Amino acid sequence: MEESYLKLLENNKKWVNKMLGNDPDFFTRLLGIQSPEYLWIGCSDSRVPANEITGTQPGEVFVHRNIANMVVHTDMNMLSVLDYAVNVLHVKHVIVCGHYGCGGVLAAMGNRQFGLLDNWLRNIKDVYDKHRSELNAITDETQRANRFIELNVMEQVHGLSQTSIIQNSWQNHRSPSIHGWVYDLGTGIIKDLKVLMDGMEDVSGVYKLDEK
């Protein structure tokens, strides 16, 4: 176990040497002001690293990850990241990215108990319950899971639009735009779900807050 741990440190040194070989000023520039254009809300799954699958460099994407890329309105961690990204970094785009084969979403489709995790999965189960007619009509289990994953991303996009953080920014700056994507582990391709939201006109009913 210790040897495996030390390998990470050795890999870090190799990476540093590689980056400096390509650009001697790489780390000097990173010391400058952080100004990413994107906030990425993704899954904690180790197979979905935001920078690598989007071909971006350190400093270009501000990242928050949790199980099943959820936007939970009582999650102070997520809200703090969102507030900092929108009001301090002034990101232009917020991307919710799920992935096919997501273990959290698959677990939420069943009735097995997992302990503490059950409280988090309950938020995902709410998405299934909301769309149960469409999902229950899909007989193929894999196709049903894939559609559930897509619907979950869409619901999180809408959830972001219902936060005062996003709504106040829209009212004051007309940004950021919110996007919903799904990453395919089997192909490496990201699918745009075409669920763009970028203004108060996209917020419905009781979720629309008065201007502060």
Image (spheres, rainbow, N blue to C red):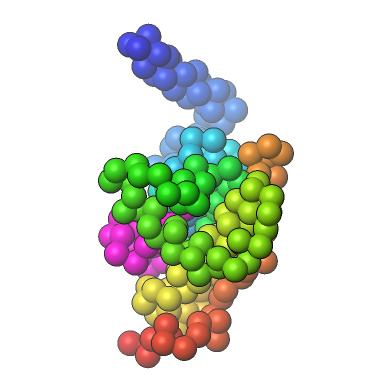
140 or 92, which is in the foreground? 140
Residue shown at 31% from the left, 53% from the top: 119
Q: Position of residue 144 (x, y in %)?
A: 63, 54
Looking at the figure, which quarter contains the C terminus? bottom left
Whether residue 200 can be seen here:
no
126 or 76, which is in the foreground? 126
Q: Position of residue 102 (x, y in %)?
A: 53, 44
Residue shown at 33% from the left, 11% from the top: 2
Where 172 falls versus 1 (above or below)? below
Whether residue 7 can be seen here:
yes
Q: Quadrant of residue 1?
A: top left
- 52 on left or right of 206: right
Q: Position of residue 88 (x, y in %)?
A: 36, 64
- Residue 151: in magenta span: no
- 145 on left or right of 39: right
Q: Position of residue 96 (x, y in %)?
A: 52, 58
- Residue 72: in magenta span: yes
Where 8 falls versus 141 (above or below)? above
Residue shown at 56% from the left, 67% from the top: 131
Give the mark count: 0
Q: Quadrant of residue 71?
A: bottom left
Where 120 falls versus 55 (above or below)? below
Q: Which residues are drawn in magenta?
A: 68-89
Residue shown at 36% from the left, 16% from the top: 5
